[in-house]
Image (cartoon, coloured by chain):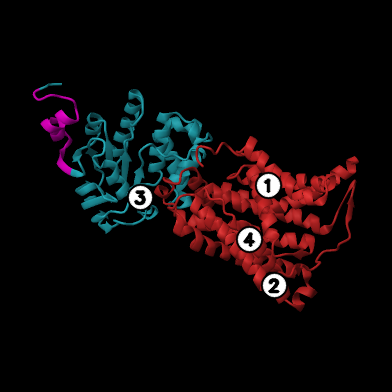
Amino acid sequence: MTALEVRGLVVTYGAIRAVEGVDLHVDEGECVTILGANGAGKSSTLNCLAGLVRPASGTVELDGNPIGGLPAHQVARRRLTLVPEGRQIFSALTVRENLLLGGFCRPQGELDGALAHVLEVFPALSPRMGSLAGTLSGGEQQMLALGRGLMAAPRVLMLDEPSLGLAPLVADQIFAVIQEIAASGIAVLLVEQNVHRALQVAARGYVLELGRIVLEGSATQLLGDDHVRMAYLGHGLGDDE
Amino acid sequence: MSPSEILQQIVNGLVVGSVYGLIALGYTMVYGIIRLINFAQGALYELGAYLGVAVFGLLGTFATRNPILGLVVAVICSALATAAGAYLVERVAYRPLRSAPPLTPLVSSLAVFFLVISIIQVVTGAQPLTYPQVLSPRPWNLGPVTLTPTEVMIAVVAIALMVAVNFYVQHTKTGRAMRAIAANTRSAPLMGINTTRIVTITFMLGGAMAAVAGVLFGINYGTVTYNMGEFGGLVAFTAAVLGGIGNVPGALVGGLTVGVFSSFATVVLPNQWQEAVVFGILIAVLAFRPQGILGERVADRA
């Protein structure tokens, strides 16, 4: 069953057209990635789906209900959750408060259980619960941003460049967790520059170029595609790994 | 000055300063979440003082027979009406300017300030209004200092309200949403926080506190004048900056500090120097410790 269905999405900033009619869908429990270079329109797509930017045209449906054009807080309440690029945690608040804010729309009674669940996924956050979020390391901040997203009990979790600016080893940890999240049945829409990693985690992917989807397919298909290998994986034609 | 005179001035300063702190809350909370110096706050304080005495008058014989109850009704009505006024100000003068450069709403807030004060001046004919004497004017001798029951009541009410507001900001869901917006305006809506609604609540809360401060001022001095919001508003702004603008406990600390300084100024210097001392503090803070007593550095986010 389709969780998120996007048709003909167009995003413009004044005269600039960042997204030019994107169609994509994420099935329930599926992990899907959007690949593309800088400026291809990946973040614009996610920001628009999250309600931070109004679509110029197109439709967005979550579980069959239209949500295109709703403001961000109403999209969040419908549990289409964005973990934004650059983490965007609440630095001046404690780790615990950040997580509780992630569950802002949930009934008070569910929060303790949700906190316990997030700490199971990210045990490293446990000893830091009382610390100000701004004092965490980059990797911990990304875990916090992911944990904050999980607190919302998302229908679809949208992740914008979760490995950005992290040391390779830390990025590995983050991808391992994303894999766990996807395996737990939460639908994930992952935007990544690290194409290799993204295709290891995701079942399916779209390739976005200049605001249009130029290619889509299963992760295996995309990994084997000459264009993807040339443009995003740094392999020449005929190269073997 | 003898030690008991010094102590007396400190106590006087704390009483007046608690009222300034209450007004400063509105400046500091609004600045905290939308980075706006809301100069209309001084006018809301004056509006609250006038609405309080007007409601007390409207209660007629009920208020004259039960002055304390009448005053409680007056202060609650004034706070609610001023909160509604603050809502109107936010809706009309700031919300349309949400995406304008920061200087634009600042100028708009000054316009609201002068507009409200001018309206009060016209409506009252610039005549001072007299506040009722509710509590006994006979001072209590508390060791080396004397205090009237009114002064004690003022300090208790003002400080209790400030502690309550601080609790609200630190420990309730709405308060946490306010702090989330202050910490990261962009990602707060992603949590499901309705930023517009929280900003409105903040304005209304600040307006209500200013109104209570206005009534307390009226009770303390017995009369209110159409220009009380000018000095009071600027002193409270000084208090907010001194405490660390954006910092809620800082409003209390700043208010009490400014109160004590200006109280000493009236003893050591001729009376007309009081304003010079207060605004000298403002200049000194801005020059030497712009983040205030409790605030963190704000240069990067201003």
Instruction: Give me the C-alpha separation between circle 1 and circle 3.
Output: 36 Å
Q: Which residues are magenta?
A: A213-238
Tags 2 and 3 both on a single chain:
no
Instruction: Give me the C-alpha separation between circle 1 and circle 2.
Output: 34 Å
Whether residues under marks 2 and 4 lie with C-beta atoms below 8 angstroms apart, the answer is no
Q: What residue is disc 1 on?
A: B252
Residue kind at label 1, given as amino acid type = Leu
Quarter of the figure that contains the N terminus of chain B: top right
Tags 1 and 3 both on a single chain:
no
Secondary structure under tag 4 reads helix
Q: Position of residue A152 (x, y in %)?
A: 39, 47
Q: What residue is disc 2 on?
A: B125
Q: What residue is disc 4 on?
A: B43
Mark 1 crowdedness (10 Å alpha carbons): few <14, some 14-19, many ≥20: many
Residue kind at label 4, given as amino acid type = Ala
Q: What residue is disc 3 on?
A: A52
Mark 2 crowdedness (10 Å alpha carbons): few <14, some 14-19, many ≥20: few
Q: Position of residue B214 (x, y in %)?
A: 69, 60
Q: Using the image, name the chain to which the residue with label 4 belongs.
A: B
Discs 4/3, front: 4
Q: Position of residue B48 (x, y in %)?
A: 66, 64
Which chain comes out cyan in the rendered image?
A
Camera-side residue of B154 and A153: B154
